[in-house]
Amino acid sequence: MLERTPTMRMIKMKMLLRYLFILLAFVVTDANTSVIGATGGYYSLDAKNDSSSNNISNLGAYRIFFIHEIKSTLSINIGYNIIFEKILTGDSSFGFDLGVNYFHFGSSNTKKSKIGNIDIKVIQDWSPYVGFSFNQRQYQSIRSAYSGFGVIIGGMKSLMNKMNLILEGRYVSLTGATSSSATELTFQTGIGYEY
């Protein structure tokens, strides 16, 4: 029987991400709304292995992201996360995530319609969402890769015509080599630009 090594996991993860990016390229050609932006905020990280466990929390979680509407209530999101031990210094972790968000009231804060020569634009004030994600993390000090799934709760609030305030909480459960594991809890706020 083949042993699952961290190298094999990384190869499978890279293949999965490659296929997902190809799928994203086909989805993005649609005329649906997209949002690009950045968030920052608080994190709490619990890490465990056979011999020890550790907890660290602070300001220092950052994320850049791209969200694309597939349907009026469903969107995909891709992000790159960086967590610093001490706001912008110290040990760090980084990695990609890919997820799906469900917007009960619709994903876009701006809805556009055209009836004859009349253009109608409705700006929704608040768009709450829930979602799930696949996450990959690389921890700098221990040079180890982790991957796992997470849940997302958040919302977008319209600030201006195409500018949105993003509020988001994420809980991610990660597993690594041997019997190591980590859980990541983040609360972030930021700005998204809708185009």
Image: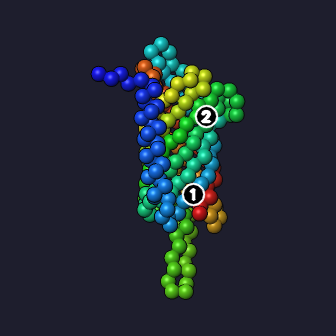
Name the residue that disc number 2 marks: 83
Q: Using the image, determine if residue 152 lies above or below residue 84.
A: below
User: Which percent across, then down, holds residue 187?
Assistant: 57, 41
Looking at marks 2 and 1 on the same chain, the residue that comes earlier in the sequence is marked by 1
Q: Is 30 or 122 nearer to us in this picture?
A: 30
User: Which percent across, then down, holds residue 158?
Assistant: 60, 62
Residue type marked 2: Ile
User: Which percent across, then down, holds residue 69?
Assistant: 48, 59
Q: CA distance from mark 2 to mark 1?
A: 22 Å
The disc label shown at residue 181, or none: none
Task: Give the class, few, some or many, for how many residues have Cα within 10 Å of label 2's Cα (few <14, many ≥20).
Answer: many
Residue at 70% from the left image edge and 30% from the top image edge: 89
Residue at 55% from the left image edge and 84% from the top image edge: 118
Task: Give the class, few, some or many, for how many residues have Cα within 10 Å of label 1's Cα (few <14, many ≥20).
Answer: some
Which secondary structure lies at badge 1?
strand
User: Which percent across, then down, holds residue 6?
Assistant: 45, 25
Name the residue that disc number 1 marks: 35
Residue at 58% from the left image edge and 52% from the top image edge: 166
Q: Using the image, determine if residue 87 lies above or below residue 1.
A: below
Contact, CB < 8 Å: mark 2 with mark 1? no
